[in-house]
Amino acid sequence: MSGAITRPLLFVSQHHEANLCRFLSQRGWKLLFAATPHEVEAHPLEEQPIAGLLDLGGDIGDADLEALEPWFAQPNIAWIAMVGCRDRLTPTARRLLGLYFIDYLTAPFESATLAQGLGHAWGMVQLRHDSLAPNARVPGPAGMVGECEAMQALFRGIAKVARWDAPVLIGGESGTGKELAAQAIHRASPRAAQPFVALNCAAIPPALLQSELFGYERGAFTGALKRKPGRIELAQGGTLFLDEIGDMPLESQTSLLRFLETGCIERLGGTDSVAVDARIVSATHVDLEAAVAAGRFRQDLYHRLCVLRIRQPALRERGSDIVLLAEHVLGEIRRQAPARIKGFSNSAMRAMAVHPWPGNVRELINRIRHAAAMCEGGVIRPADLDLQPPAEAHPCTLAAVREAAECNAIREALQRHHERLIDVAAELGVSRVTLFRLMRDYKLQIRRQDLGLVVREG
Ligand SMILES: Nc1ncnc2c1ncn2[C@@H]1O[C@H](COP(=O)(O)OP(=O)(O)OP(=O)(O)O)[C@@H](O)[C@H]1O
Ligand SMILES: [Mg+2]
């Protein structure tokens, strides 16, 4: 390979063989030499290697190898080892090679074989890089807040179902944001410029639901003074959102099924068949399959409605999103209300984090609205939210407080940087060796997956 040298290669070896170095340089590798973990650390951050070559032929000891583990663990560096004799590898070397290396070469080997291996290493790093990208945080659709994995999965689900012009059934407990999701699907779909029409099947008396859905002709019944289009017709070209579909009476279920099968409706009191192109998005907080089994919901309609499905996670499944949502809601209130609200007290934050939230996001919003009106001195405390102050489970010795803060800071930085240890260490102002040791102490394990790392608390 000729031309500009573009691929930094970290070469950890105690004797850099001149011929091999020259050969690798000619193949487009920029060699970053290091003989000890200390020298590895000393490399400037901007010279981020994409591959690592470890020479186990010299007398590099187990202690040095362990000190290098954070480097081996980085997903954005692919490692290859040069081994003198496989049988003489120490248990430490075997463990590290098995865990982190993509290959090892036993001496003697051709330089070309090594160059080929390093080429693969470079390819692996590209794959890891690409595979981390889809997991990057996606912002929620307008008005939807959520960073936890359950919400991120929901946002990805919304984006996917929006592309297909098929009925969607949204499940989830009351107050979890089903209507918000339905609007998001519509806005992300090719029908976005057309109407979004919502109808809550539980809020309309059964006797009126037929005329609400299908409309009526003049004189269809006493009081029908002029023709009125139904919600289905009003959604022409757009999306019809049928909330609480589980409460739809059987008569309307039959008419809705006919519409889904024929794409046509008949207004009450009329004989004309009107073609309507509307996508149906429905939502339910009840178990529709149980309703089908109990004979309260038509099975054929159920299958028609749930071609695509998404599920809203309950608030208690959203971890620290609760705090994020609380801040979001308070931000909205601040914009509207003249009162000066400073924010939540620490104990209010903890109380919100442990409350079971049976009413989900709606309950959270209502409690914060109430608290914003009732709090004194602009600080919202647990009592303002009508919540119990949380038990003082947090650490009280200075050492324990420091450890808890340290552990939190590392966990959050790992999430922020998608487990890129080099960036986490740079942000936290510690060496990668220190970072790795702290992660071990706090049982913040990194687990190597096929292509990348995930962080989980041990
Ligand atoms: N992810 C979210 N981010 C911000 N606000 C949210 C989120 N999810 C829900 N909300 C808010 O919570 C409230 C309840 O949401 P929504 O009415 O969509 O819930 P629902 O599941 O349809 O409830 P129900 O089953 O009672 O009809 C709304 O004010 C909505 O704006
Ligand atoms: Mg709703």
Image (tube, rainbow, N blue to C red):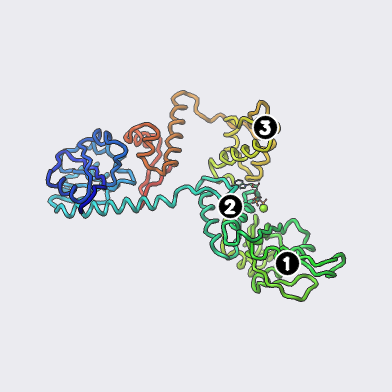
Task: Report the residue at 68% width, 66% height from top.
Answer: 295
Give the number of the disc on residue 384.
3
Q: Earlier in the sequence, mark 3 or mark 2?
A: 2
Q: CA distance from mark 3 to mark 1?
A: 45 Å
Q: Which residue is mark 2?
A: 312
Query: Is residue 248 shown to the viewer in this render?
Result: yes
Query: Is residue 63 shown to the viewer in this render?
Result: no
The amino acid at mark 1 is: Ser
Q: Which residue is mark 1?
A: 252
Residue 413: quarter of image: top left
* 66 w.r.t. 184: above or below: above
Residue 19 percent coordinates (x, y): 12, 46
Q: Going by the image, does 148 lie left or right of 67?
A: right
Does the CB distance between marks 2 and 1 fall below 8 Å?
A: no
Q: CA distance from mark 2 to mark 1?
A: 26 Å
Q: Residues within 10 Å of mark 2 (few under 14, many from 20)?
A: many
The amino acid at mark 3 is: Asp
- Which element is circle 1 on? helix
